Image (cartoon, rainbow, N blue to C red):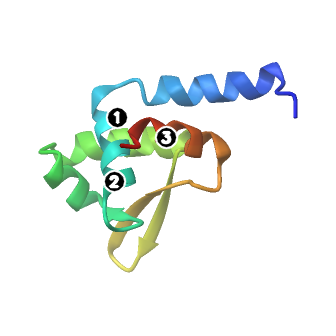
Amino acid sequence: MKKEIRDYEVLAEKFKTIGHPVRLAMLNLLYTCDSSKLTVKSIYETLKLDQPCASRHLNIMRKSGILERVQEGVNTFYCLCFNDPQVRCITKCFDK
């Protein structure tokens, strides 16, 4: 199947989104964790970030379609959007 330029533009935008060290660390954490989703608290505590900083970066990745936010009661979880083939492509960078 031939890729269109628009497909590459969308992928390039996702690469721009993860082009920050904190976002790369978050992406790696979510990809390599034992759970399919993590709470905001577990993300910022593991990465030793303050909560507003973590939330800001998570929201940027959510808006770009890399992450999904799931609300369960008072907890907010984030998980990777593996239904997006471009997200699956990006996460291959973290394979061992």
Above or below residue 90? Residue 81 is: below
> Mark 1 highlights which residue?
24
Amino acid on which the number 1 mark rests in the picture: Leu
Classify residue 40 by image quadrant: bottom left
- Label pair 1/3, CB-CB below 8 angstroms: no
Where is residue 2, by image quadrant? Answer: top right
- Residue 59 or 27: which is nearer the viewer? 27
47 left or right, relative to 65: left
Q: Amino acid at mark 3?
A: Lys
Residue 14 badge: none
Q: Secondary structure at mark 1?
A: helix
Eyeballing the image, is 79 above or below 19?
Answer: below
Tell me where residue 9 appears, x and y as whole percent. 70, 22
Figure quadrant of the N terminus: top right
| Mark 2 or mark 3: whose residue is earlier in sequence | 2
Q: Position of residue 81 (x, y in %)?
A: 56, 54
Instruction: Find residue 62 and report its horizontal and vertical position in percent.
Output: 50, 46
Q: CA distance from mark 2 to mark 3?
A: 11 Å
Q: Which residue is mark 3?
A: 92
In the image, taking residue 81 as reference, residue 78 lies left or right, namely: left
Q: Residue at x 48, y 42 (%)?
A: 91
Report the residue that reaches farthest toward the right. 1
According to the picture, the residue beneath numbered tag 2 turns out to be 32
User: Helix, strand, or loop for circle 3?
Assistant: helix
Which residue occupies 60% across, 22% down? 12
Q: Alpha-carbon distance for marks 1 and 3?
A: 13 Å
Counting other residues with Cα less than 10 Å from the Cα at mark 1, is it few (<14), some (14-19), or many (20 or more)? Answer: some
